């Protein structure tokens, strides 16, 4: 055997070849020296990027075993129970092997390049892998027609995958909308000739003039189904009340049970986790097939139970699941976590598109709220994905209105300049509500996590459902689903009194009452019906505001968009009614004297409901641009974009005065996800030396020297730690930095060196330098191993005096996991993403130990 062992093997077939092969970490490939071809087999690192040990490692004094407590998430199982033995030619026992610590099956070899659960991806390495793959395809297409076809497939696979995601998201949303509407109506009654129809469809097919009234003879309440007459009002009311509560509890309990048993990740909104995943965090199973199936089944059940939640947030999660599932069909995205997140960003846009019928708003939502990396090509593909999803939803027509939007409105009167004052007031109220809701909901969720309540999620769901249903049924505005209530509050009053909200006392120009069959537009004092409606809305406002605090975070799919909009719509309608009465009572006020010709021609309370909905949604989520676009797409009210903008800005300014994080950022922090917001600014005056490790009094870093260490030294180093990698230095004396060695690269390199060269023994020297030692003359002597090309010679480095504001920018903008700290080229320490997050948490007076990731 040659004195040098340049590792030669074929991973898939497990056979050795006579070609000399070098492990090339920098280009993420295997390069054969005999034919010059690249074999793109990734050796990646996925272990702990935080726990770089503080103990120096020398091959003279032996391996130091770290007795400190292991990471609670990882435990100390990584390299336990893997020590089997085989005999080398020298007769010495050779410890084997490291591969079992990663993947014990053959399939595990195909998963090189993947990451473990609760780990962060390395954006730079993933993008480097993608550039290598792209170069290989470009070079290969000149060689054969087949490779040219492969190049074309690679080019259009991105558009194909977002097309499939859009088709799937639109189909899921359409089915969910139809099922949700039927389940919501079934609590109140049933269609006698076709039980599968909701009330609106039933009345249309029975040719009823108005499906919103009780004149639809084909729709029967449960009291009518059981043969009770309308004259027996108390009995019918009690029976309908009982069935309403019973079905609500049945729906919510079934949803909670399915989530608990089959897919625990299907609970909640999903947007905080999707946002964290898009930032580079790995949560295995969160976007899986079971989560997709169970969340699609339970979202209609949860909404139909009349809990104060919506399906819009879950639809974003469902669309992201579709993106993950279809992304696995294309190796371009399945084997690269950074590329996969481009598909997930497009899927998030499609989720909002089908949730509100707002494709443009969905793209902006993905850009503004959830995406971490959003290049221009992702923008176009997100637009195409959202467009496809919206087209499919329109084809299904779940709303039965031939409109894509959920709350289509037509206001016949413009808004006036003086109305910017109440619109801005609505923005302030929306910001105050958002700040109060975020604080209260996070406090309750924190209590749930630390109390026995978190151990009985199904009972909690049943209890909240019972309280919600029992309190909602007596009020006609809370008895129906929130979407229907919002649609009614957005409506403009016309010539005919359709609801109590339009019950005004019409009057002529002289102020005398008119009692004619043909009424003018409502322009008078509040009627008895409107007085009742106002009190009912006030009660509904209190109920919705309070109950939503306890609902968001239950172990069922819970969206927050519709409940927030419902609170704002009620608030806006009440203020709109008040402004209209003010204009009617004081028609000569200078603010509107020259603009208005009567209250009805000046003030539209439905417009105030729409602006209020935008204000509260902005106060809760802190969205601005995407919120305004979603709202005008949602309602079709393009001419009212200025009031929406004013309300959104005042809402954000007011909410930011009490804290800059929205509800989703708050839940990310509550759950301890390692999310480093690339939109936030770091203003504290600290240096890298204040954050790096080792700190004063700590042992030195555990490092690898470029020459002189043995295979056994490195194997013991890997077995005794859970760390992502090790800095490579020239020697312990000089501490000159050479590069960074990733753990997984080292594991596979050592394992395959043992497998394919029997002269690689425990005492074989390992060299990470270019210069080769003299060749070994005897075949019985240990063969040295050269692993220079698995060393990252260009790690991200900073000096000890680098301001932390620059360090935070580097971590957030580049998506790196660690940076090495040097002084005049000498290694001083390391800063990991977890160190940065802990430092920020400490400066913000938060618990630094709440960060759960590795």
Image (spheres, helix red, strand yellow):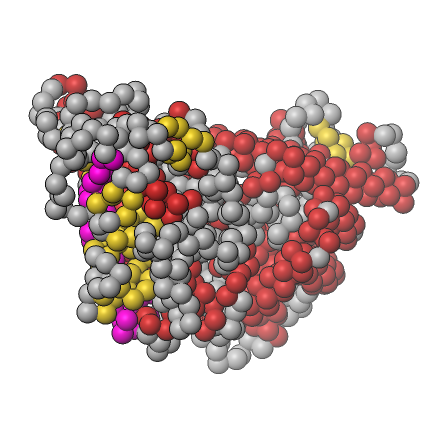
- Residue at point 58% right, 77% down? 586
Give the residues drawn in magenta, as a range.
Answer: 782-808
Q: Locate residue 457, reporting x and y percent.
A: 70, 46
- Name the quadrant containing residue 840: bottom left
Of 652 and 82, the residue lying toward us: 82
Q: Is residue 716 left or right of residue 236?
A: left
Identify the residue at horizontal 27%, vertical 33% (top origin): 760
Quadrant where the N terminus sits is top left
Foreground pick, 401 / 799: 799
Q: Quadrant of residue 296?
A: top right
Image: 731 above or below 841: above
| Residue located farthest toward the bottom when viewing the structure as drawn | 590
Residue 625 seen in render: no
Q: Which residue is pictured at 15% across the width and 30% down the height? A: 2
Q: Is residue 70 visible?
A: yes
Q: Nearer the viewer, residue 459 or 401?
A: 459
- Residue 352 located within the stretch drawn in magenta: no
Would residue 26 be found to the left or right of residue 202 on screen?
left
């Amino acid at each position: 055997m040659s004195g040098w062992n340049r590792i030669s093997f074929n991973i898939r077939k497990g056979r050795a070849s006579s070609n000399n092969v070098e492990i090339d970490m920098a280009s993420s490939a295997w390069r054969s020296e005999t034919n010059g071809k690249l074999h793109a087999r990734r050796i990646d690192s996925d272990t702990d990027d935080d726990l770089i040990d503080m103990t120096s490692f020398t091959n003279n004094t032996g391996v130091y075993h770290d007795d400190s407590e292991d990471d609670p998430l990882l435990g100390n199982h990584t390299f336990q129970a893997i020590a089997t033995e085989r005999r080398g030619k020298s007769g010495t026992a050779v410890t084997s092997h490291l591969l079992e610590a990663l993947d014990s099956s053959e399939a595990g070899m195909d998963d090189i390049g993947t990451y473990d659960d609760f780990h962060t991806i390395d954006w730079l390495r993933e993008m480097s892998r993608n550039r290598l793959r792209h170069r290989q395809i470009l070079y290969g297409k000149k060689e054969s027609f087949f490779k040219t076809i492969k190049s074309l497939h690679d080019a259009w696979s991105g558009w194909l995958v977002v097309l499939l995601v859009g088709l799937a998201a639109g189909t899921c949303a359409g089915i969910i909308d139809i099922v949700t509407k039927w389940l919501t109506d079934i609590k109140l009654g049933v269609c006698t000739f076709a039980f599968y129809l909701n009330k609106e469809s039933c009345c249309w097919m029975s040719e009823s003039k108005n499906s919103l009234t009780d004149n639809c003879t084909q729709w029967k309440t449960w009291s009518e189904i059981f043969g009770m007459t309308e004259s027996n009002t108390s009995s019918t009311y009690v029976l309908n009340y009982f069935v309403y509560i019973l079905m609500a509890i049945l729906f919510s309990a079934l949803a909670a049970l399915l989530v608990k048993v089959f897919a625990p990740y299907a609970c909640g909104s999903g947007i905080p986790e999707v946002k964290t995943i898009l930032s580079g965090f790995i949560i295995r199973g969160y976007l899986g097939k079971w989560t997709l199936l169970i969340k699609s089944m339970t979202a209609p059940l949860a909404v139909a139970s009349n809990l104060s939640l919506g399906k819009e947030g879950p639809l974003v999660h469902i669309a992201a699941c579709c993106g993950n599932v279809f992304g696995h069909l294309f190796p371009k995205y399945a084997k690269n976590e950074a590329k996969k997140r481009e598909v997930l960003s497009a899927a998030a846009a499609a989720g909002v598109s089908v949730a509100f019928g707002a494709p443009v708003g969905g793209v902006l939502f993905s850009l503004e709220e959830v995406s971490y990396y959003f290049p221009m090509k992702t923008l176009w593909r997100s637009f195409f994905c959202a467009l496809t999803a919206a087209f499919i939803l329109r084809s299904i027509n779940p709303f039965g209105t031939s409109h894509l939007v959920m709350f289509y409105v037509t206001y016949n009167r413009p808004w006036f300049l003086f109305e910017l004052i109440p619109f801005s007031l609505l923005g302030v109220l929306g910001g105050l509500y958002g700040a109060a809701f975020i604080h209260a909901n996070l406090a309750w969720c924190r209590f749930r996590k630390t109390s026995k309540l978190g151990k009985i999620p199904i009972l909690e769901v049943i209890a909240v459902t019972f309280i919600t249903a029992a309190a909602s049924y007596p009020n006609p505005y809370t008895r129906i689903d929130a979407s229907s209530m919002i649609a009614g509050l957005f409506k403009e009053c016309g010539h005919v009194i359709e609801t109590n909200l339009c019950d005004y006392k019409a009057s002529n120009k002289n102020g005398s009452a008119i009692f004619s069959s043909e009424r003018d537009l409502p322009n008078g004092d509040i009627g008895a019906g409107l007085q009742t409606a106002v009190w009912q809305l006030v009660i509904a406002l209190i109920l919705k505001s309070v109950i939503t605090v306890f609902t968001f975070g239950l172990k069922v799919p819970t969206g927050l968009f519709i409940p927030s909009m419902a609170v704002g719509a009620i608030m806006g309608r009440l203020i709109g009614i008040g402004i209209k009465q003010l204009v009617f009572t004081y028609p000569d006020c200078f603010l509107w004297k020259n603009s208005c010709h009567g209250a009805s021609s000046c003030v539209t309370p439905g417009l105030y409901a729409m602006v209020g909905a935008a204000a509260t949604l902005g106060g809760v989520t802190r969205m601005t641009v995407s919120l305004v676009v979603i709202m005008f797409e949602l309602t079709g009210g393009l001419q009212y974009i200025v009031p929406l903008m004013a309300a959104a800005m005042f809402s954000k300014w007011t909410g930011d005065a009490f804290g800059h994080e929205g509800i989703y950022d708050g839940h990310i922090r509550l759950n301890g996800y390692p999310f480093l917001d690339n939109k936030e600014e770091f203003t504290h005056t600290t240096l890298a030396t204040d954050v790096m490790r080792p700190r004063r009094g700590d042992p030195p870093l555990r490092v690898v020297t470029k020459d002189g260490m043995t295979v056994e030294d490195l194997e013991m180093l890997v077995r005794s730690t859970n760390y992502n990698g090790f800095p490579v230095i020239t020697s312990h004396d000089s501490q000159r930095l050479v590069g960074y060695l990733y753990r997984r690269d080292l594991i596979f390199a050592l394992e395959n060196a043992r497998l394919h060269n029997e002269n690689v023994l425990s005492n074989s020297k390992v060299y990470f330098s270019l210069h080769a030692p003299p060749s070994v003359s005897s075949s019985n002597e240990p063969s040295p191993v050269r692993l220079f090309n698995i060393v990252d010679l260009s790690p991200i480095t900073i000096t000890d005096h680098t301001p932390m504001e620059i360090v935070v920018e580097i971590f957030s903008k580049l998506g790196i996991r660690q940076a090495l700290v040097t002084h005049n080229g000498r290694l001083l320490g390391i800063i990991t993403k977890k160190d940065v997050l802990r430092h920020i948490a400490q400066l913000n007076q938060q618990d630094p130990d709440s960060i759960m990731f590795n």
